[in-house]
Image (tube, rainbow, N blue to C red):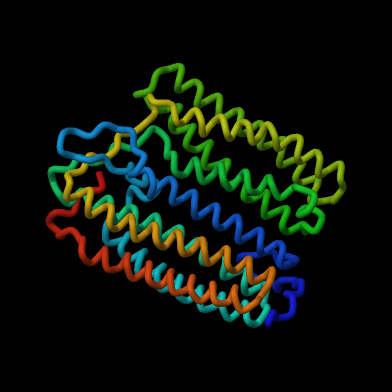
Amino acid sequence: MATPPFPTEVLPTSPSLPSDLFLTPELINRTCRDSCDRIQLVADLLLLQSKSNTYQPVAGQKPAALEPISQGNESYSKSRDAIVANTKGLAISIKDLTQNLHKHSLGGIYRTVESMTEQAIVLTEAATHAAYFTALADRRCQPARPSVVDRYSFERAKQAIHMSYDMFKPDYINSMTRSQVLQISKTFANNIAVLTHGCKNASENQSLKETDRSQFANLVVCLQGTTSSFLSSLKLFAAHHSEDNRKRCLIFGKPLLAAVDSTVEFSYFRQFAGRAAVLTERGYESQTEILGAAMAIVGSSIQLLETTGDILNEADSENWQKMVNCCKAVADATKLLSGSMRMHTPLPSRRPSVN
């Protein structure tokens, strides 16, 4: 039998959330969809590259995905510790999510969805990095060479900026509070900083042609100019919610999105590409098993978030059974990852150097 519908809720003060965040089942449904997209992007960038890599391997060897540059200074042991910590955290978050769904606590559901998303992403990143180190434990393998810019960080920044811009659609913006608008402003600023920092470093890279260095420098100027115009409009909208001010944000947001898209697209030019690691058959197999377990976590986590949205729409017995199955699938996937890590742990004397 279906349970009563979820009521709206004003979220109490929280260190990580605006104190006046007005929550509805629709808003959390959107959060679940966005979380699925965020996790899927990480999987596409880190897990699926090894299946679609276009670099040609040497005879008898196979290519691997590029090393996750965002964790380039991490060690195998730190990646393993991150997996252990976030596996435990994910189990706790799933338990909390189920309890909050039963209690109709929208604030609790929102927090646990956010926590689960971050934990699933960190697990994927750490598993990818651990798989890279494990594969390179065979000294016959050749390590990856980083690209000029961190494409992984660029793609994630682009996604965050587009998601924030989409919040200015009428069906969402009308109930947005001042704190939420300011939070969007911070999201834009932080992610634009990722792009400008990467472009600035590339503009100073003496291994590039002068024309390419100049183009990266121009991108910095373009990003900063369009961001300034957009944030000024956003500040005005935060002070006074009006249709004209909302349209102003949409107008000045378009050139900003165009600058962001151009920056990311330019970073994929062939002359800025790194080199994929080249692995032996043994290294490839050990990497693939760990990546497969990580992919199982991604798939089950996405299904769990989708089911959370289904329960918010209709909390019937069928959806609750789906929730039980999804929780079990996530638990099985984390066990599979732990088992793969134990089976393929590289010997200390053979762990590759980060550099």
The answer to which quarter of the image holds residue 147 is top left
| In this view, 50 is above or below 212 | below
Q: Position of residue 191 (x, y in %)?
A: 56, 45
Number of numbered discs visible in the structure rendering: 0
In which quarter of the view is residue 225 placed?
A: top right
Residue at 68% across / 82% down in the picture?
A: 1
In the image, what residue occupies the spot 75% across and 39% down?
250
Relative image position of residue 45 (x, y in whole percent):
43, 45
In the image, is 255 to the left or to the right of 300? right
Q: Left or right: 101 with respect to 211? A: right
Give x and y (percent) for residue 287: 26, 52
In the rendered image, the vertical position of residue 277 relative to residue 1, given as above or below: above
Quarter occupied by residue 85: bottom left
Q: Nearer the viewer, residue 160 or 198?
A: 160
Left or right, 86 with reference to 350: right
Between residue 271 and residue 192, name the one nearer to us.
271
Position of 188 relative to 212 (above/below): below
- Residue at 70% x, 34% y is 254
* Residue name at image x 66 percent, y 48 percent: 164
Which quadrant would the C terminus be assigned to in this image?
Answer: top left
Instruction: Pinpoint residue 7: horizontal percent, then vertical percent.
Output: 76, 74
